[in-house]
Image (cartoon, coloured by chain):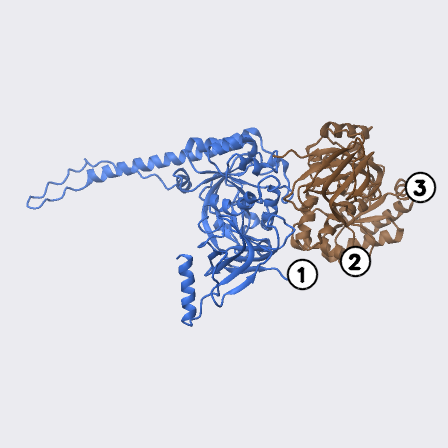
Chain colours: A brown, B blue
Amino acid sequence: MSTRWLAAGTLALLGPVALGAGLLVRGGTVWTGTGEALEGGAVLIRDGKVAAVGRDVTAPQGVRTIDVTGKHVCPGFVDPHSSLGLPTWEMDETVEAVAAEMPVDAAVWMDRPEVRDAVSSGVTTLVLAPGGANLLVGPCPALKLGPSPVLKAEAAIKVTVGPSALLWDRKPTSLPALLDMLRGALSDTEGPVGRLVAGGAIAQVACDGLADAERALGLIDGLHLKAALLLGGAPSRAVDLLAGRDLPVVLPSLALTPRDKFLVGPGQLAGRGVKVAFASFAPATQEADLRTSAALAVGAGMSPAAALRALTLGGAEAGGVADRVGSLEIGKDGDLVVAAREPLDLSGAIELVVVDGEIIYERVPQ
Amino acid sequence: MGPTALLVAAQLAMAAGEEAKPTPLAIEGGTVVTVAGETIAAGTVLVADGKIAAVGRDVVVPEGARRIDATGKTVIPGLIDALSTLYLPPQELAEPSAIAPEFRVTDGLDAYAKDLEEVLSYGVTAAHVAAGSRGLLAGASAVVKVSSQPGVLPILLDTAAVRGQIGVPAGSTISSLDRLGNYTSIREALLSARDYEWALGKYEREFTRYTQKTAEPKAEEGKPPPPPKPPGDKPERPKKPGPDYSADVLLRVLHREVPLLIEAHRVADILNALRLQDEFDLRLILLGGSEAGKVAEEIARRNVPVIVAPVSLSMVAPSKLRYGEHSRTNAAQLARAGVKVALGVGGDDPFDSKFVRASAAVAAEDLPRDQALRAVTLSAAEILGVADHIGSLTEGKDADVVVVAGDPLDVRAPVDLVLVDGQIAYERRAAG
């Protein structure tokens, strides 16, 4: 029910243009998100999915064509960790340490200006994951900011390893007890948490600082979890710990941590092969910060390709939805962003946002 | 001294075999965006004695000058953060005195502040420090240079403006009545400064009359001395009004010697600030202006400049309440209406000033690119009254020069070199 409400809210807010047969965006430079940049490329979307990407794509009959010559096309941005639209009092459920049955989408309130801001900044997918004061929160849904909002209802479960989940008036009150409870809940396939894990939800393990990161890795390895690491603290220090692992690492928006020692982190991690993503942790920061974060990270040494990947495929991997979104590949969802300049050049506006083949945002020139 | 004279002097010094003071420095081959004049492809910026000695295509570089190759790069004036807390210790942000226009922000600056190198490395060479207090009339703001040397705090202008605010909540809320109260309090302070001036004038007139009356008649030459005035006939000595430092400063504002800088974000508050301008004919500068675009025509009609800050809430802690309906297109809307616009980062932390370029970039989504760069250089300098020193690559101005390895409005292109007063303040190490 809440899901339908969400859809209605989105429709009313954004008024998507029904396109029916499909959409061809052509003439621009297409950044596929997999490392390729096609000058004068085109993306064809049919039935909400990417049907073709390349230089010689023509519009079948009835398909609307948008010419974006001189502009840039890239996948929609993915925020793997957000509380966008949630009222603040819903974000930290503190009565239960384990809140795995909390239906997160029931708390969504999409009729808010920050949703419009998120869309106009190029974000098309987000994983809604509140609850920093809990050990476990889920199921966290992956949502599209478009006409069919639920991408994956049980996309993730948030796991907190660290003192922020310790409260004096409920169990656990110590780290050993916390880890014990986590191991128990995550491996109990009969319980709600274990069921989610067994069902393929990605465990987003939040940690703050190096010691907690080591604890989190121990938990992930010990239970063979499909996981992503939400890394607080200075990422530079964790480079050696994380290099060589096939583990998505989610960094909070650099707006929260704009010091140079943080800004160089994404580049250092990506430089060692770590799959980096940026998350807004909204409303702590805004979805619009993701693009700013990526641009500033490039200024601090990250390769432009790695930064764009972090915004798109990296976010999708960390949200457990890389099979559906994050790159412009045939068969994936028809989500794309058209920017006036290169996608990470902040001085170029986001001009067009398409979700599932439908235009949900078109910039009105000022 | 003109640039030619400087050059000649430098050459003479060389010829005489004297030790030239600092070695002149030539930045050659880059695209020189002067901001004040035309952009020069493959131009040279010659720096000597801390000043810009010459800018152009065919600049004669004196022998012995240090040459820096900027081929393929962009040379721009040092960037100015038009709303910064650089050099300000955090406690200076919390001064509770409501009406204290006589406070000077320069009294609270810390010359040993950290973060300066980080800010310099982003090409920011000057900052307008205006956040001395959260008070309604919070005192004089200052324009400072950014220095990487601990203990050195170059103040370019110690009284750039008197800063006030209307409707900016100190905590999380402010009522409509308090917003109106802010305006009324500032207005009353200006009126009482006028009263004070009137009382001083009255006293001076009375005192003149009093001295005339009480002056002992002097003996004229060749005549007998006049009889002394009878006692008891003496007029009462007029009483001088006590000192009023607050009024003294506000009188400078009322006499248009110093601008009044009013931070206001919401339309109602901005309009009230404009009412102050209308009533007192002062030099108003609007600060903040989150919703200023909605009343751009009103602002333009009065020729009031605006320091838009923050431009993007992506770079500073967002507070929806404080900034009202913040819009990234604000600066563009104002500029289109003909308002002179500068951009401030508007962060609470000193190091936030490093985001001047990022702020200009965000503004450039809608603002023409030359105007976006001007808003963080020459327009800022003009609004703050320091354009004779900084803001453009113009002969005779301070040699605050930045070399960017690419487009100055694309923050992905790193800053390679920063000069402040002709000295290398930052130089990027090669990657690796």
Helix or strand or loop: what does disc 3 sit on? loop
Q: Earlier in the sequence, mark 3 or mark 2?
A: 3
| Residue A253 versus residue B200 in the image, above or below | below
Crowd class of label 1 (few under 14; some 14 to 19; many from 20; radius 10 Å)? few
Quadrant holding the C terminus of chain A:
top right
- The one nearer the camera, A356 or B15, is B15
Q: Are marks 3 and 2 on the same chain?
A: yes
In the displayed structure image, the side of residue A62 where residue B344 appears, left or right: left
Which label is found at residue A233? none
Image x and y of residue B85, in percent: 55, 48
Helix or strand or loop: what does disc 1 sit on? loop
Give the residue number, with chain letter if any, for mark 2: A241
Specify the quadrant of the image occupied by residue A336.
top right
Image x and y of residue B328, in percent: 61, 38
Which residue is drawn at the image coordinates 43% and 69% (left, top)? B14
Which label is found at residue B431? 1
- Residue farthest right in this picture: A190
Tell me if I can see residue A325 in this picture.
no
Task: Give the residue type that dot 3 points to.
Answer: Glu
- The one nearer the camera, B262 or A357, is A357
Task: Give the residue type that dot 2 points to.
Answer: Leu
Which label is found at residue A190? 3
Task: Give the residue type that dot 1 points to.
Answer: Ala
Crowd class of label 2 (few under 14; some 14 to 19; many from 20; radius 10 Å)? few
| Residue B74 versus residue A3 in the image, above or below | below
Image x and y of residue A101, in percent: 85, 37
Tell me if I can see residue A284 in this picture.
yes
Report, in whole angstroms, how far the alpha carbon at label 2 lies from the one at label 1.
23 Å
Report, in whole angstroms, how far the alpha carbon at label 1 lies from the one at label 3.
53 Å
Crowd class of label 3 (few under 14; some 14 to 19; many from 20; radius 10 Å)? few
